[in-house]
Image: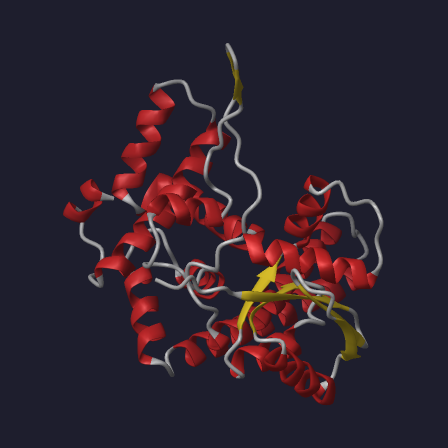
Amino acid sequence: MDKVITVTAGIDTAKRKLDIAVHGQALRWQVENALPGWRQLAAELVKAAVTRVGIEATGGYERGVVAHLRADGFTVLLLQPAQVKSFARMRLRRAKNDALDAVIIAACAAMIDPPLVEADDRLIQLADQLTFVEQLEEDIVRFKTRLEHVEDSRQRRFVDADIGRLNKRRTAELRRIVKQLRRHDDLGQRLDLVLSVPGIGERTAIALIVRMPELGRISREQAAALAGLAPFDDDSGTHRGQRHIAGGRGRLRRSLYAAALPAAFRWNKALCEFYARLKARGKEHVAILVACARKLLIYANTVVARGTPWTEKAVQAC
């Protein structure tokens, strides 16, 4: 059987230009980071027989070219800066410029596995809207903190008015996201399944659907790792270190953590019992809440995978 060789290119992204390198070849070139440049890039990649492209996430400047290349049929791997930086360290590379970065990105993309689930353009757009909601929530917290230190009644009225305005905008934006999710039968069904889990409200369900497109198509361990809720070992020789969570999708993790407390104390019977068991074993409150957040994610992943709403009996298998 003939071995299939996948030719991989790497792209270093800047606001106005793209530097490209093909892994294992001397091909290097540069194009404009705009539609004419994307078209030229796609044509050059076809000539070079490239089918896989690695590109480092760069604050949104990469989104246009990523969408264009995916539409043209290329497999695009969106790499996190930490991946590329760690790969360069592993290769003992110290020199750095845009052209060399493209070479490193190409080599990194050639070695890593493709994503478990292909990117969903519908959710990419909704992710930006959800980020705006999260920023509104951060503003509300700041205004409430400011209000605690304002004594002048006139100024308090101003701050109260700002908080009310931000809350209304937050509510309207969340309704808009839900409306857009329900325009698609598959996303609407996924939302209803996640909402069937006691303790997961609309805000948390939106975060799960939008921030984790893989939900229901990966294992519980993979889901926990992607959300940054998996406890990783820290052992060496006879030393057994404390388990810690790290990395993952921070915004999703914060949403699940915020939902864990009310779920574990009131809304989810299984989670209440789980919290009590861990507390009886002497676990700390914060560590228990992290475990409860992980359980909520596992419950959501399970109901979506099965395609059936939550039932109390089903929790035994989660």
Q: Where 292 sits versus 109, above or below?
A: above
Q: How is the image coloured?
A: secondary structure
- Look at the image and tell me in which quarter the C terminus lies: top left
In the depicted structure, whether residue 70 falls above or below residue 252: below
Locate the N terminus by quadrant. Answer: bottom left
The residue furthest left is: 313
Residue ranking furthest to the top: 238
Residue 197 locus on image (x, y percent): 29, 55
Residue 87 seen by the camera: yes
Residue at figure coordinates x 34%, y 20% from the top left: 280
Which quadrant of the figure has residue 13? bottom right
Q: Nearer the viewer, residue 57 or 40?
A: 40
State left or right for residue 316 relative to residue 147: left
Q: Position of residue 236 (x, y in %)?
A: 54, 17
Q: Is residue 198 left or right of residue 34?
A: left
Q: Considering depth in this image, is 55 or 129 the residue closer to the camera? A: 55
Specify the farthest residue to the front. 1
- Residue 226: horizontal and vertical position, in percent? 48, 49
Q: Nearer the viewer, residue 190 or 51?
A: 51
Q: How many marks?
A: 0
Judged left or right of residue 128, residue 115 is left
98 left or right of 104?
right
Q: Position of residue 82 (x, y in %)?
A: 67, 48
**Residue drawn at x 73%, y 84% as measured from the top left:** 37
Image-quadrant location for residue 78 = bottom right
Q: Above or below — where is 131 with respect to 221?
A: below
Quarter where residue 20 is shown: bottom right
> Which residue is pictured at 40% across the width and 47% down the height?
222
Q: Residue at x 47, y 61 (%)?
A: 207
Asked if one can make out residue 198 in the rendered structure from this viewpoint, the answer is no
